Amino acid sequence: MKVAITGATGFVGSRLVERLHSEGHTVLVLTRNTTFAQKVFPSQAFPKLEIIAYTPISDSWQDAISLCDAVVNLAGEPIGEGRWTPERKQEILNSRKLTTQKIVEAIQIANPKPSVLVNASAIGYYGTSETATFDETSASGNDFLSFVCQTWEAEAKKVEASGVRLVILRFGIVLGTGGALGKMITPFKLFAGGPIGSGKQWFSWIHLDDIVNLILEALTKPEMQGVYNATAPHPVRMSELSQTMGQVMNRPSWLPVPSFAIEALLGDGAIVVLEGQQVQPKRTLETGFEYQYPNLKPALTEILK
């Protein structure tokens, strides 16, 4: 295949590019920063990779979409970094909405068209709860992150009018050596690890290798269409996550990070870590997808070994 990817230099995107390249596929990286992308993917190591400057105000990159078999849209500003000022909220929303708009427009005018668009979303779609369980059929929430996800998905769904297969993957917290887990590792190394906030909030997670495998299945299985939760089948509460990290790292896990400290640091953005949702990947399991890491402790052991 030839696969175009936005967000290719990110935590998930870079691993996806490595995997596609290792399997002999050609990858087209659509990026706003070609210099950075060339550092992440040096030509000596990635000879079958093409890097094209992506700018929403220029259409020159759109011609390349016509030569691709599939598109993966992972673009979006990180939601868990910095305070959610009004300007920051607009960046979070626009980075997803506007990029998806342009990708869909490019697919609509492509000739021939890619056969599939795999578009990221997030389990923030469902809102937060300590008691409810959500699957792909559950209603949307009514907070900011839910609004972002609803807007994001609505733009992606416009591609279906062109007869292109659409798969929307609602990402849980992706576990790997970077990302959210990377920020939690340091306190544990310093013997200062513990649950964040009450510890009762749900943590719906997925191992980085499993999210990449799921994207690959979405690209290659024509029967996959619609929304799938990209989470492991066994979510945990924050207290269990901390306890398991302590066990795997052989460090104490009793020192909690109080809610007010996170709120002081992140403002409204604290919702990302202080509130959660218990999400089940019902449709994902129905496809027969086999998780390498369905349970937390083996996942953390592999990452932290």
Image: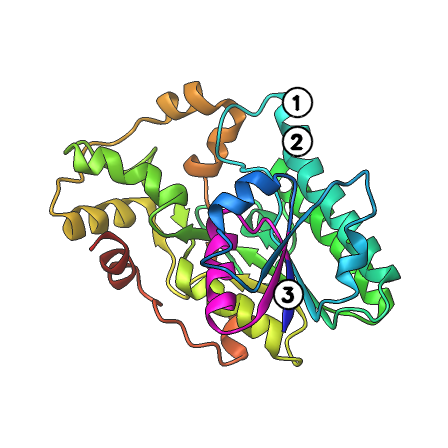
Looking at the image, residue 144 lies above or below residue 219:
above
Seen in the image, is 56 located left or right of residue 145? right
Picture residue at 70% right of the left edge, 48% below the top? 152
Q: Tell me, yes or no, if residue 250 can be seen here.
A: yes
Q: Position of residue 279 (x, y in %)?
A: 48, 58
Q: Which residues are magenta?
A: 5-29
User: Which residue shows up at 31% across the image and 64% down it?
Assistant: 295
Q: What label does residue 3 carry, if any?
A: 3
218 vs 83, nearest the viewer: 218
Alpha carbon distance from label 1 to label 2: 6 Å
Counting from the top left corner in percent of width and height, residue 23 is at 48, 73
User: Whole-percent x and y of residue 291?
Assistant: 40, 72
Left-right relation of 289 to 73: left
Residue annotated with mark 1: 87
User: With respect to residue 291, does 222 lie above or below?
Assistant: below
Q: Are marks 1 and 2 in contact (CB under 8 Å)?
A: yes
> In the image, what residue occupies the spot 48% across and 31% down?
81
Judging from the image, what secondary structure is the residue with disc 1 in? Answer: helix
Which residue is at the front of the view, 219 or 155?
219
Task: Name the quadrant containing residue 15.
Answer: bottom left
Q: Nearer the viewer, residue 211 or 17?
A: 17
Q: Secondary structure at mark 2?
A: helix
Give the spatial CA distance, label 1 vs label 3. Answer: 33 Å
Which quarter of the rendered picture does the N terminus lie within? bottom right
User: Could you tell me the amino acid type at mark 3?
Assistant: Val
Q: Which residue is mark 2?
A: 91
Earlier in the chain: of badge 1 and badge 3, it is 3
**Is residue 152 on the magenta stretch?**
no
Can residue 200 be seen here? no
* Residue that lies at the very extreme toward the front in this rendered image: 44
